[in-house]
Image: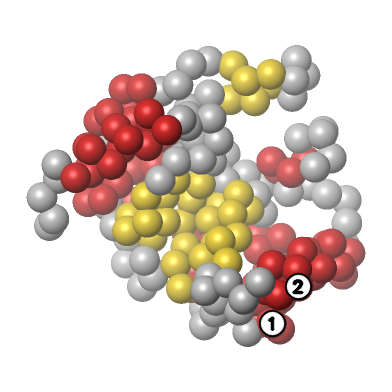
């Protein structure tokens, strides 16, 4: 939203109070529609997650939370993914948690970091391309090999809500559905 990439790192230069004031009206509008569930996604920092978790408690709204990640173990602000998910799992309104908008090649390892957490896991990676904030463009191509080979591993690692995020296509999702449809339930 700020076009400087801060939304991908969670460095907003806002206090928790200001961050809550930013998110509150958005949640209010969404909740007016009486959804069954909110998907709160692409969270880059534990601090932002904490603010959102407070708001979920305030509104008593069910949601899943998913985090964007910097690598195979850390969310975008450098904090541990496991610690962030454990923080979310402690809030009764959170019915699932996981990762989104991450490179598909990282998903299996990231899900492995979450072993033993008592929540359904969410995984919906992006295409595998990355955003170059200096040139203002997507770089690299879709990580087709990971999209072909990895989804059964995501399921085996505990993901129960699986899909695609940025720059995935209907063809990507059709191939994902076909691949997962061919996996025997374990």
How much space separates mark 1 and mark 2, taking CA atoms? 8 Å
Which quarter of the picture shows residue 118?
Answer: bottom left
Q: Is residue 16 visible?
A: no
Q: Say which residue label 1 marks.
A: 59
Q: Residues within 10 Å of mark 2 (few under 14, many from 20)?
A: few
Toward the front, the furthest residue is 33
Q: Residue at x 38, y 60 (%)?
A: 121
Which quarter of the picture shows residue 24?
Answer: bottom right
Instruction: Answer left or right for 95 relative to 18.
Output: left
As drawn, the label of residue 23 is: none
Indicate the secondary structure of the residue bearing disc 2. helix
The percent coordinates of residue 40 (x first, y second) are 60, 60
Q: Tag 2 or tag 1, which sits nearer the N-term?
A: 2
- The answer to whether the residue labelled 1 contacts the one labelled 2, judged by CB atoms less than 8 Å apart, is yes
Q: In the picture, which quadrant includes the C terminus?
A: bottom left
Q: Is residue 171 visible?
A: yes
The percent coordinates of residue 106 (x first, y second) are 41, 37
Q: Residue at x 84, y 62 (%)?
A: 22
Q: Residue at x 25, y 30 (%)?
A: 149
Q: Residue at x 48, y 16 (%)?
A: 141
Q: Say which residue label 2 marks.
A: 28
Instruction: Answer left or right for 100 relative to 27.
Output: left
The percent coordinates of residue 116 (x first, y second) are 32, 67
Is 85 or 143 nearer to us in this picture? Answer: 143
């Amino acid at each position: 939203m700020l076009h400087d990439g801060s939304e991908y790192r969670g460095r907003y230069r806002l206090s928790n109070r200001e961050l809550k004031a930013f998110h509150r009206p958005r949640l209010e509008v969404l909740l007016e529609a009486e959804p069954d569930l909110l998907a709160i996604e692409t969270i880059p920092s534990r601090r932002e997650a904490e603010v959102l978790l407070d708001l979920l408690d305030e509104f008593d709204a069910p949601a899943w939370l998913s985090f964007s990640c910097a690598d195979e173990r850390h969310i975008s602000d450098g904090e541990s993914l496991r610690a962030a998910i454990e923080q979310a799992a402690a809030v009764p309104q959170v019915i699932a948690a996981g990762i989104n908008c991450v490179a598909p090649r990282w998903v299996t390892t990231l899900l492995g970091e979450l072993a033993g957490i008592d929540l359904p896991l969410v995984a919906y990676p992006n295409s595998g391309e990355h955003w170059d904030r200096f040139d203002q463009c997507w770089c690299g191509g879709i990580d087709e090999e990971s999209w072909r080979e990895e989804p059964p591993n995501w399921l085996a690692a505990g993901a129960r809500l699986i899909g695609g995020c940025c720059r995935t296509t209907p063809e990507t999702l059709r191939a994902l559905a076909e691949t997962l449809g061919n996996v025997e339930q374990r």
